[in-house]
Amino acid sequence: MMEAASPPPDERAPRVGRGAPHALREVERTAQRYRLLARADNLLHRTLDYEETLEALAAFAVEHLADYCLIDVLRPSGEMQRVTHARDAEAAPLLEEAGRFTLDPTAATPGGHVLRTGEPVFQPHVDEQFLKRAARDEVHLRVLDRLNPTSSMVVPLQAHERRVGVMTLVRTGDEAFDEDDLALAVELGLRGGLAIVNATLYHAARSANRAKTDFLSVISHELRTPLAAIIGYADLLEHGIDGELNEGQHSKVARIKASSNHLLQLIEEILDFANRSGDDQPLHLEDTTVARVLAEVDAVASSLARDRAVELRVEPPPGDAHISTDPRKLRQILLNLVSNGIKFTEEGYVTLTAEVDEHDVLFAVRDTGIGIEPDRLDDIFEPFWQVEDPMTRTVGGTGLGLSVARSFARLLGGEITVSSQPGSGSTFHVRLPRVPPTAAPDAGLD
Ligand code: ADP
């Protein structure tokens, strides 16, 4: 038989001096219980990881209430999982052995009963009869017997109406559980249940998000390959590889290329979105000048402006201010903003400017277009969000440009803000540090 491993009484649930008046004892016990539950809340809220939540709950129960804790949870897959924790490290292997006899939700054991009904089972004095009821078979009974339980309670783990498992608390010494311990265990079961449900929901949301971005990334890769072939063959035709084209053929091939390039741009945008959702995007930092970045954006965006009656004005800052940044990401941010400006401006102009101070560069993209209603200014940064009805809007786009731009800006240690006047135009500001926070602080820039 194993030695009883009782914790010092002051580490457990409240024990108040016998001489204290009854009402005072009650108040002190209640206060002590709330303090303990507040600590449990604090501990359980530190993580949204499923396994860590179970471990934290079992460890807390053992620290404050019991010599052993066994937690049986119903996984979203329908399987039962058991986590065990022992106060005495020497008892851990034996408890682990008991842990192999996972709970059968249909069995007439105390755990099965609690899981089905949600009613706690309170057995302050464990006897042979109770052990027989708790055991699944003879082998299990022998393991339970060697654990030497003297007092036990099994409480549901549940959040609202949803039961997710049961928690079994066991003592091995002379001090039996009392009604106060049961009340504390039931409360702990509610808090633990809520933490488990939260961890499950968080896990499900992350998996769904990953599935969505994986899907987008696969689809866009698959679309890019045939599209590259279409553009390549159109190029060959245009260069007269298979004979000179007449004027009509030339203009049709040019249209094929323009539409294909447009489609390619949309696909790149979806890929950017899918890639940036994998939290660990690498930054490729380089030292470059603000003027060079603006010139590169100008080269690509000016042809977009030419197609519409919009003038693009790019105004670099005086001098050759340097910035340490990921130039591809910065170009993408500015291109997304400038092409939006051009897209949502019927006539007028779009300006791209940059101001530099000691620490930051402040880029501004101003347009004289349709503007954005004040109550939409937050929504436009949400992925796939578009102000206009997708069925009736005349301009193209995936609804990802601003979302990608904002997440790239944050990745570079900066932020994007917008102000707008419906009917008169919008201004998007991008503030970026000249040295991103992750870069070496002594990367001297002039
Ligand atoms: P899209 O591919 O639709 O341009 P974005 O994420 O870039 O996606 O922009 C989201 C929405 O924000 C746009 O559909 C448009 O309704 C609005 N928007 C963005 N930029 C401007 C702008 N410069 N002027 C007016 N509306 C804009």
Image: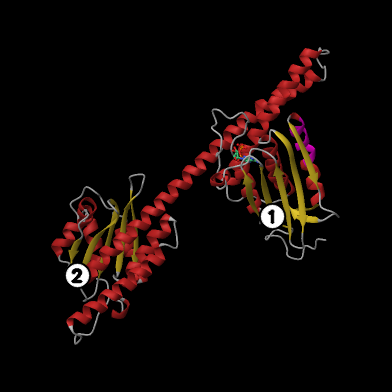
Q: Are marks 2 and 1 in contact (CB under 8 Å)?
A: no
Relative vertical location of residue 266 with respect to residue 351 in this rendering, above or below: above
- The amino acid type, in three-letter code, at marker 2 is Glu
Tag of residue 431: 1
Q: Quadrant of ligand 1?
A: top right
Q: Disc 1, ligand 1: is the CB inside 8 Å?
A: no
| Badge nearest the viewer, 2 or 1 | 1
- The quadrant of the picture occupied by the C terminus is bottom right
Name the residue nearer the viewer: 15 or 267: 267
> Which comes before the other along the chain, label 2 or label 1?
2
Residue 304 on the magenta segment: yes
> In the image, what residue occupies the spot 43% across and 46% down?
204
Q: Disc 2, ligand 1: is the CB inside 8 Å?
A: no
In x, y percent, where is residue 402? 62, 43
Q: How far is the residue under mark 2 from the one under mark 1?
A: 60 Å
Tag of residue 179: 2
> In the image, what residue occupies the spot 51% across and 39% down?
212
Name the residue nearer the viewer: 205 or 318: 318
Magenta stretch?
298-306
Q: In which quarter of the image is residue 304?
A: top right
> In the image, what residue occupies the spot 55% across and 31% down?
390
